[in-house]
Image (cartoon, rainbow, N blue to C red):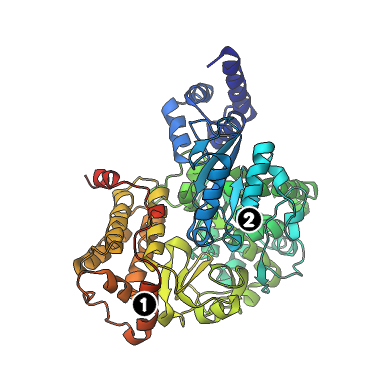
């Protein structure tokens, strides 16, 4: 490294650390500053950061290696991230990737000779309703075609300025000058709770401040609001636990790390209901007596950050954040934005807290729970974007109003991100209790044969289960609903999900780190026509072991789609096994109803293994087994 280059690196690192007062807690922000200015966080930068923060290089290196948006190796000034979730793959991402490679002269994982452009894959960028899509730095480009991909490549080679790629902005606040995105909200159905066009500004907060904090919590409890992030824990109880835990301070964190493949409804709320979100966080802060809040924003949604920062500043100016909020003496609260860096596991609340603390996003042991000991060791409320928005509406319209919508155990409405083989992908606000059959009709599903409810970590069902309903009592989901028609290969879908979980596992516990590799290995064996009926028992036993012994929600849910596929598509497995009878899979299953769809799924699509899905070598799998 030359002297001038070394001076520049030292200056960048010094400025980044001083900007955050050499505070170790803000290591994520420091790394972002360095990554953006240098194109990497190399060994020398790590040494300097460690010195400035009185830390160790191994700690800094641990963070850089953990998050996909950070890199020790030099990246291009412009990084093109190709979304490779299953929906984008079905929409033609393989073709788009090939065009980029041909036009730019680089393969995924490579940097152009002039150092301007990098090409790489990203697991999911939250644009499944407008696939295939890519991120070009923080600029989102959607609905790609061969022609538009060539045009983008030519534009970037001529002038590596991603902002010039946006020729036409999307609807709503996507057209705001601070967003300036070609993203479409695709709001297909507006409900009465969150996507209502007549939501009065700050009505919930105004009413909350007329009540005692305990009464605010009681209102939320009476509504029976449950967390919209997937687990469904009673929101009022969570707030109460945090408030009752004795501590010098408390924190409120919004989980906007919407990384589940096929999910994008929080993106719409962040774009169109930012004030409502921050209002809900402020109500939670008042109820729990918190002074500090954090919005944890996934890196893929960085394009929304300038707009969200402006909304926060506007709220400070109008007395909705800061001291004596809305004239309430002694009520002080403010919110900062913490940008993630590409780690699916940070959607788990304790891993998210670790990330906010400037650590690897690894789940923490429980107990204690975050409401007892969370961010920096203090009681912390962590709720989903949708949950905070619902809380604000409950304080405005009342618990009885909210509880009158939906089902007994699942009150209110649910935002669903619907994508895949359907005419109208997008966001739907529906009351809890809607059946899969009715939802598929609403979205114009094309010959639906497979539905994945809850993203890759959710439940896979077939036609004989389309009578089931979306609610906590039946099919629970954070929001993702992926539809697949009978032309799709169910085992390739499973193979993709398992690859995703292998890539995204934090690697802490063996059942998740190794178990998912073995699941995928066995699925691939069956796909090649080498499976035996004993392999199905092996899959079921291993799935149950992983789910019961994994440390966090990733491992506890990652095998669900495998079990669902075995239950709902037995003839797909049967057609590929060496022996035709699939070892007792018919029990409790309507075989006549499944026969037609299973034959179509099994025969219309080639079961020959697709190398696009295999990135781990046999040697790697053998090493993991050892």
Q: Is residue 408 above or below residue 576?
A: below
Q: Position of residue 319 (x, y in %)?
A: 78, 50
Q: Count neighbours of disc 2 (C-alpha within 10 A) and say few if under 14, some if 14 to 19, many if 20 or more.
A: many
Q: Nearer the viewer, residue 568 or 24?
A: 568
Name the residue furthest right.
318
The residue that label 2 is drawn on is: 142
Q: Is residue 20 left or right of residue 199?
A: left
Residue at the image position 52 percent from the left and 46 percent from the top: 247
- Badge count: 2
Q: Are marks 1 and 2 in contact (CB under 8 Å)?
A: no
The answer to whether any part of residue 347 appears in the image is: yes
The front one of 292 and 518 is 518
Within 10 angstroms of label 1, few (less than 14), some, or many (20 or more) residues? many
Separation of residues labelled 1 and 2 (CA atoms): 33 Å
Q: In the figure, is residue 549 to the left or right of 159?
A: left
Residue depicted at x 35% and y 45%: 508
Task: Choose the circle earlier in sequence order: 1 or 2.
Answer: 2
Circle 2: element type: loop
Q: Position of residue 349 (x, y in %)?
A: 48, 52
- The answer to whether 112 is drawn above or below residue 271 in the figure is above
- Outermost residue to the top: 3
Whether residue 291 is visible: no
- Residues 269 and 563: in front is 563
Q: Which mark is residue 145?
A: none
Quarter that holds the C terminus: top left
Would you place residue 146 above or below residue 377 in this image? below
Which residue is painted at 40% across and 48% down in the image? 503
Q: Which mark is residue 598?
A: 1
The residue shown at (55%, 81%) is 438
Q: Name the element at disc 1.
A: helix
């Amino acid at each position: 490294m030359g002297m001038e280059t070394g001076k520049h690196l030292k200056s960048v690192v010094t400025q980044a650390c001083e900007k955050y007062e050499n505070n170790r807690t803000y290591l994520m922000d420091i790394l972002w500053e360095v990554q953006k200015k240098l194109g990497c966080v190399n060994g020398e930068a790590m040494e300097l950061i460690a010195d400035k923060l009185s830390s160790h290089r191994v700690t800094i290196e641990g963070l850089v290696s953990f998050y996909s948006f950070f890199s020790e190796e030099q990246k291009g000034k412009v990084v093109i991230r190709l979304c490779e979730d299953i929906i984008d793959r079905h929409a033609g991402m393989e073709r788009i990737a090939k065009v980029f490679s041909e036009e730019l002269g680089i393969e995924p994982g490579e940097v152009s000779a002039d150092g301007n452009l990098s090409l790489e894959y990203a697991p999911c960028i939250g644009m499944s309703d407008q696939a295939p899509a890519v991120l070009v730095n923080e600029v989102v480009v959607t609905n790609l075609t061969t022609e538009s991909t060539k045009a983008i490549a030519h534009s970037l080679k001529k002038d590596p300025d991603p902002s010039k790629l946006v020729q036409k902005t999307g609807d709503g606040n996507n057209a705001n000058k601070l967003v300036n995105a070609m993203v479409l909200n695709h709001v297909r159905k507006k409900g009465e709770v969150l996507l209502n066009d007549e939501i009065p500004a700050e009505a919930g907060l105004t009413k909350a401040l007329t009540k005692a904090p305990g009464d605010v919590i009681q209102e939320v409890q009476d509504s029976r609001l449950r967390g919209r992030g997937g687990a469904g824990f009673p929101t009022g109880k969570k707030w109460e636990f945090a408030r009752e835990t004795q501590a010098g301070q408390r924190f409120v964190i919004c989980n906007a790390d919407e990384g589940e493949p096929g999910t994008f409804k929080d993106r719409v709320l962040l774009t169109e209901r930012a004030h409502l979100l921050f209002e809900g966080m402020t109500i939670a802060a008042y109820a729990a007596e918190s002074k500090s809040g954090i919005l944890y924003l996934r890196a893929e949604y960085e394009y929304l950050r300038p707009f969200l920062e402006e909304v926060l500043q506007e709220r400070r100016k109008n007395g909705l954040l800061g001291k004596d909020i809305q004239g309430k003496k002694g009520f002080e609260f403010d919110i900062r934005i913490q940008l993630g860096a590409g780690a699916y596991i940070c959607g788990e609340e304790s891993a998210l807290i670790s990330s906010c603390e400037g650590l690897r996003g690894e789940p923490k042991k429980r107990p204690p729970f975050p409401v007892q000991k969370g961010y920096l060791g203090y009681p912390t409320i962590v709720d989903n974007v949708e949950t905070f928005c619902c809380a604000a509406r409950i304080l405005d319209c009342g618990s009885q109003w909210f509880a009158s919508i939906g089902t007994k155990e699942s009150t209110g409405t649910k935002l669903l991100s619907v994508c895949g083989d359907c005419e109208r992908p997008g966001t739907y606000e529906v009351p809890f209790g809607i059946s899969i059959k009715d939802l598929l009709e609403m979205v114009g599903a094309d010959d639906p044969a497979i539905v994945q409810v809850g993203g890759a970590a959710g439940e896979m069902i077939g036609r004989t289960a389309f009578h089931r309903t979306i609610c906590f009592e039946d099919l629970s989901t954070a929001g993702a609903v992926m539809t697949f028609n009978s032309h799709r290969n169910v085992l390739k879908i499973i193979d993709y999900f398992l690859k995703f979980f292998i890539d995204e596992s934090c690697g802490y516990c063996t059942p998740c780190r190794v178990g998912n590799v073995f699941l995928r290995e066995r699925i691939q064996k069956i796909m090649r026509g080498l499976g035996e009926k004993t392999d199905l028992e092996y899959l079921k036993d291993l799935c149950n072991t992983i789910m019961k012994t994994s440390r966090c929600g990733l491992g506890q849910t990652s095998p669900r789609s495998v079990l669902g596929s075995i239950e709902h598509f037995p003839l797909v497995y049967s057609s590929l096994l060496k022996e035709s009878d699939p070892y007792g899979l018919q029990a409790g299953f309507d075989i006549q109803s499944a026969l037609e769809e299973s034959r179509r799924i099994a025969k219309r699509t080639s079961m020959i293994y697709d190398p696009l899905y295999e990135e781990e070598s046999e040697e790697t799998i053998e090493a993991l087994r050892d």
